[in-house]
Amino acid sequence: MKSQNQSSVFYFILLGFSNFSELQRQLFWVFFVDYLVTVLGNAIIIVVISLEQSLHVPMYLFLLNLSVVEVGFSAVIMPEMLVVLSSEKTTITFAGCFAQMYFILLFGGTECFLLGAMAYDRFAAICHPLSYPVTMNKRVFTKLVMFSWVSGIMVATAQTTWVFSFPFCGPNEINHLFCETPPVLELACADTFLFEIYAFTGTILIVMVPFVLILLSYIRILFAILKMPSTTGKQKAFSTCASHLTSVTLFYGTASMTYLQPKSVYSPETKKLMSLAYTLLTPLLNPLIYSLRNSEMKRVLLKVWRRKVDLHAF
């Protein structure tokens, strides 16, 4: 494998939707509002859970970590994307592209494992409620969170370092809105076959292993819920899990459409739209899903709001 210092490319040009200038102008404002709502919604969840002692339990602490991931994910992608949409062509340095790809993979990989850990938490709480305090104690929770973050870091380090070890001799135009692995890899002037096998296999493992764990957890949860004698208990259990299932469907569905597709199947424009689905929709909808579908979160949000109103009144 050739080394990076043999590259003759020192910066890249992000094309965005440069062939559709009118569309770019319209998308700019849509994405700008999306970014503000995403950051605000997830920031509210982070602050509320941090301040409210009654929410310092694994279920909500997992949610806090998920919101941190979503804020980071949006912060890495959206500002650069807005710059791309506000001009015909946007340059990004070699180092800047490396950093963006690294953190996209870090936050994306971490979210994959976090969603799996959250499914296990719900499985333990609903299927084994009596032993739940022991099964999901502080030590177990800490290990699951650390594993999620460390796994994301390892995936990002291995994949990004390998991609940028290839020489880039030109052209330097990335037909995308940000530095995602497939469009950057297309510019490498070397044989990338082995990397493509690694990346595809790695993506399957990172996506499918947590997804299978989630599927198995919720099959068990469904049987446990159906055995509940109380209708109220069933409704509460379904409500608790519905938000997580919605989030899982959004994330794994849209991400797999982007990363598990054969390169030749879709046009570059279609790939851009599919990438936008998981980079925009999931971080935006997660806070809405968890706050509107969760009665405890709604109660605490209302409590914090009333406290704020009372302070202003005095």
Image (tube, helix red, strand yellow):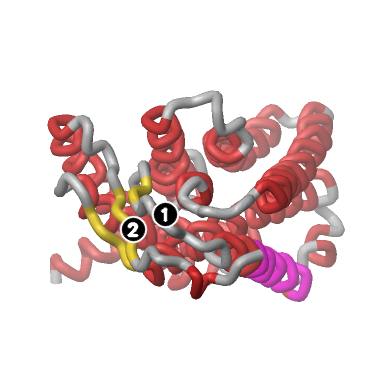
Q: Residues within 10 Å of mark 2 (few under 14, many from 20)?
A: many
Q: Which residue is mark 1?
A: 179
Residue 160 image offset from top left, x and y in percent: 56, 63
Tell me the kind of residue under disc 2.
Answer: Phe
Please give the name of the residue rendered at 73% of the width and 31% of the height, measured from the top-left corner: 230
Q: Is residue 199 above or below residue 1?
A: above
Choose the circle earlier in sequence order: 1 or 2. Answer: 2
Res. 12 mark:
2
Q: In the depicted view, which residue is nearer to us: 214 or 223?
A: 214
Residue 55 at x, y percent in the picture = 54, 64
Residue 108 x, y percent position in the rendering: 55, 54
* 167 in the magenta segment: no
Q: Position of residue 109 (x, y in %)?
A: 61, 56
User: What range of the chain is rendered magenta?
Assistant: 139-155
Residue at 63% across / 31% down in the picture? 235
Q: Secondary structure at mark 2?
A: strand
Q: Quadrant of the C terminus?
A: bottom left
Horizontal relation, residue 284 to residue 180: left or right = left
